[in-house]
Image (spheres, rainbow, N blue to C red):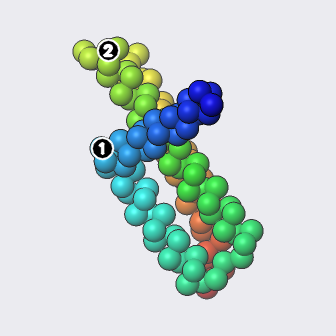
Amino acid sequence: MKELKKRLKSFVYAFKGIGSLLKKEHNAWIHCTAIVVVTIAGFYYGITPTEWCIVLLCFGMVLAAEAFNTAIERLVNLVSPDFHPIAGDVKDVAAGAVLICAIAAALIGGIIFLPYIF
């Protein structure tokens, strides 16, 4: 029973982290806005179940990348509060990873939605 409580508590911490991401990170708000718009478009155009699966994977990929980026940035700020070129590079690479995921998601969105639009 004690082990089960530990597992359940880990979910509490995970949801707390998601809440922190959504409360404090403007880029996460932008991603969430895109998620809402794409979800509305998906219902409007009646995309297939397979397309929904792909779109949902893209949502998760981009939000997870943003969460990793946020965690990395916060950790770097903690251990290196003063400017350091390596710390800056670490943060830039993490931000670049989010951009890669967002571009991939946008391209996939284009592949899925452009045939419906045209």
Left or right, residue 70 beside residue 117: left
Numbered mark located on residue 72 in the image: none
Between residue 77 and residue 6, name the one nearer to us.
6
Figure quadrant of residue 47: bottom right
Position in image of residue 82 (x %, y %): 25, 15
Q: CA distance from mark 2 to mark 1?
A: 20 Å
Q: Is residue 67 visible?
A: no
Q: Residue at the spot x=36%, y=55% of the render?
A: 29
Looking at marks 2 and 1 on the same chain, the residue that comes earlier in the sequence is marked by 1
Q: Name the kind of residue labelled 1 in the image.
A: Lys
What residue is disc 2 on?
80
Judged from the image, the secondary structure of the residue bearing numbered disc 1 is helix
| Image quarter hosting the N terminus | top right
Between residue 93 and residue 45, name the one nearer to us.
45
Q: Residue at the spot x=66%, y=68% of the render?
A: 52
Left or right, residue 44 beside residue 17: right
Left or right, residue 56 beside residue 62: right
Position in image of residue 44 (x %, y %): 55, 84
Judged from the image, the secondary structure of the residue bearing numbered disc 2 is loop
Mark 2 or 1, which is nearer the eye?
1
Q: Residue at the spot x=55%, y=38% of the render?
A: 8
Q: Name the kind of residue labelled 2 in the image.
A: Ser
Position in image of residue 18 (x %, y %): 43, 44
Q: Is residue 101 visible?
A: yes
What residue is disc 1 on?
24
Position in image of residue 64 (x %, y %): 53, 44
